[in-house]
Image (spheres, rainbow, N blue to C red):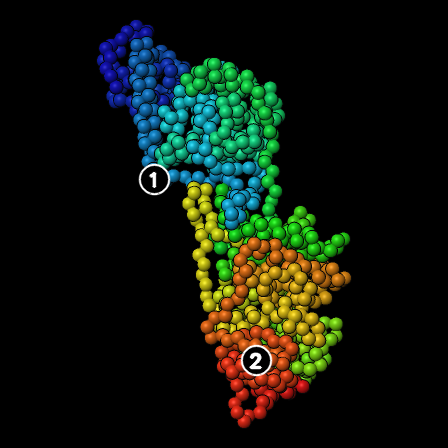
Amino acid sequence: MRQRSASPDPQGGELSGAPLLQLRKPGPFRLPSPAPFRLFIPSRFPREGRLSPCPKNLPSPAGFPGLIFSLVFHTFKKPFLPAFFRKGGFPVEILTDPPGNKNKKIFRILLLVGAGFLLFSFLSYSGLFLYAKMAGPPPLTVPQSTVYYADDGTVIGETDSGGKRYWVGLDEISPYFKQAAIAVEDQRFYSHSGFDYKRILAAIFADLKAMAKVQGASTITQQYARNLYLTHDKTWARKIKEALYTIRLEANYGKDEILEGYLNTIYFGHGAYGVEAASRFYFGKKAKDLDLAEAAILAGIPKGPSLFSPVISFERAKKRQKLVLKKMAENGMISEEEAEEAFREELHIAGKHPVREKIAPYFQDAVQQELKRVMGLDERTIALGGLKVYTSLDPKMQKSAEENMAKTSPAGSGIQAALVAMDPQTGFVKAMIGGRDYAESSFNRAVKAIRQPGSTVKPFLYFAALEHGFTPSSTLRSEETTFYYDEGRRQYAPKNFNGRYAEGNLTMAQALALSDNIYAVKTHLFLGMETLKEYMEKFGITSKQEAVPSLALGTSGVSVIEMAKAYSLFANGGTAVEPRFIQKVVGKDGQVIYEYKKKTRQLLDPKTAFVMTHMMTGMFDPKLNGYAAVTGSSMLKKATRIYAGKSGSTNTDSWMIGFTPDLLAAVWTGYDDNRAIAGSREKAFAKNLWIGFMEDALKGKPLRSFQPPKGVTGVWIDPATGLLSTDSCPVKRLTYYVENTEPAEFCAEHPHLPPDSEKGAEPRHREIEDGKKAGKPWYRRFFDWFE
């Protein structure tokens, strides 16, 4: 409200001292009281106003357009003239703003707006910086190829999942490429804080001038944020997220760290992510070996890989290279002469990723399963986590396994094979075959196939027997037998191979060497059918086993790797070890995130384990030949060292599992569709593969024999009777027993004094007490019921 001096009446009168009301904003306003007054309505304001209260004596002149009369207020909706109002007896003066006042108001408004913008910008930036610090560094989840190494450090494979990714440090990247990338992508990278405002304004003006998007303004940090966390869509939501990640990166990482990350994540086309992959693809060399011309070519590609790839268009790539070299020269990174020389350099484009044959693919699949099981990693992390996985694979052993499979596999046969070789002392798997051809079938038969093991279960049975009073000399009669069980309601009539039997007594050592089925089933029924099942579980067999008479002959399925684990208990003296494929895992930051720590547990009595192991050498010892040859006789010509093992066969499966103190190998052969194995070559496949592999794998390595632990004694026996041998026995074999369980009697079939006694020396064996006649040992009398 302000007062004005009297002004002339438009129709001759004067309005002396009338108060002047100035309306400076739209909306309701109150008239001063008392009337008369003058109303000031600036012309730039809306034409609608509200007056309240209205003088009670104000008439409603018909000549005043737009006047709506009320006892409370008047509303003006249309322009009106003072004369109309004055006719109503109410003096009003309509004025307009003075020109000078308008300029002052505009200046004040602009000043306030500018100050508000600066304050808003300051508070926003401070808030974002505080947010970035509180949120901390964003996770650098950069997709990278995982690389697998053998135990000698050689690379055996890597994952790509549609692209090649390698992470290298700045010191492993050519200085030329670092300079070229900065020159063409972000010249003020080391001076800005994530956003180049000068470049942003220049891009805006360029886009407005062209009325199109012609110039970008993203910094290296912004591009890195986009590569790490975001898609490349053009939405505002993505741009806001990109800005937030950019601030977090700048607030929590150094410039060199950001540059390193950017150079390792940009896409160069053809499935190459990062400068290392691009360098290998385009030039067949490492990123640290790039020269100036090559670096300039690569630096120009990320703007449009489908346009500037020299593989797609060498001409466009050269134009882009020229621009990069020009910018490098303008920024003082190189001289103009160097730029010209680099441009003229002849380039040799490889245009292909280095092809590395995948070594041991079944083994690598097993490694990935162990990463999931032991470390809890998901498939994406395994494939793109940039891990360095150091495995237990021995490349020479793997090659030997594959070559022997190819060499011994029956020609024209589709029979499959699986092999697991491991160090029985540590559990590290050294070689693996999961099938004849990974390209045809990636199904890993060494791990996933459940097949009948046949007689390879007999060592578990006889180990249980040793712990229940049997010895290697315990004898049972071998003849065709029908067994009744389940209180006589059911019967089982096993057969020996080729229908041949001893038709007399066999020692347990000889029964194992000849793989006599009658001896095995008799022992199984005597111990109780649940006993073998329990012992197989004790040895680490997790596949379901059915406690029936035929379990002694291996009719319940197992996997190859289960059997390798179980047999390792014999080879290492009863210490439980798990089959392992991984020695250690290194993350992409160079830190060891997993390392195998050997955890051993003495599961078996080492004395009994050794006695069983020595019994298993019998399959290779002709001294145990009887009604048939020992089951390892076909391998004797190739064997150059002492092995312990056991073979097994069913109509559809063939097995050979054996070991030395340093190496164990389990082999299975058979058909996926469970058809019968036919022909001598197919039946011999497992043994031929096993002995060929073991001989090649151990060639040139020291000969090591199994050493008896304390509490075990070795005596010479007659293999046919299991009694102490004399000088008259045609065959003598050194056999080991747990102390105080060895035979006390001499062979009665060759009744001569032992050689040591004839010479007057102290005999090696315990003498029969004077005056006592040698009779049946307890175990013969005990098993008379079988006969």
Give coordinates of residue 658: x percent, y percent.
60, 63
Where is residue 230? Give x, y as percent.
49, 35
Q: Which residue is mark 1?
A: 134
Please name the amino acid that badge 2 sits on: Pro
Residue sitting nearer the eye, 167 or 85? 167
Q: Is residue 146 above or below residue 88?
A: below
122 or 140, which is in the foreground? Answer: 140
Q: Residue 705, relative to residue 43: is it above or below?
A: below
Which residue is rendered at x = 59% and y = 66% of the image? 644
Residue 365, relative to residue 384: is it above or below?
below
What's the amino acid at mark 1? Answer: Met
Considering every residue shown, the one lying at the far front of the view is: 759
- In the picture, measured across the screen, residue 686 lies left or right of residue 333, that is right
Question: Could you tell me which quadrant the C terminus lies in?
Answer: bottom right
Which quadrant, please, contains the N terminus? top left
Residue 686, horizontal then vertical, whole percent = 67, 60
Q: Identify the disc placed on residue 755.
A: 2
Q: Could you say whether the residue bearing mark 2 is in a helix, strand or loop? A: helix
For this rendering, which residue is in front, 692 or 263?
Answer: 692
* Residue at 24% over, 12% down: 4
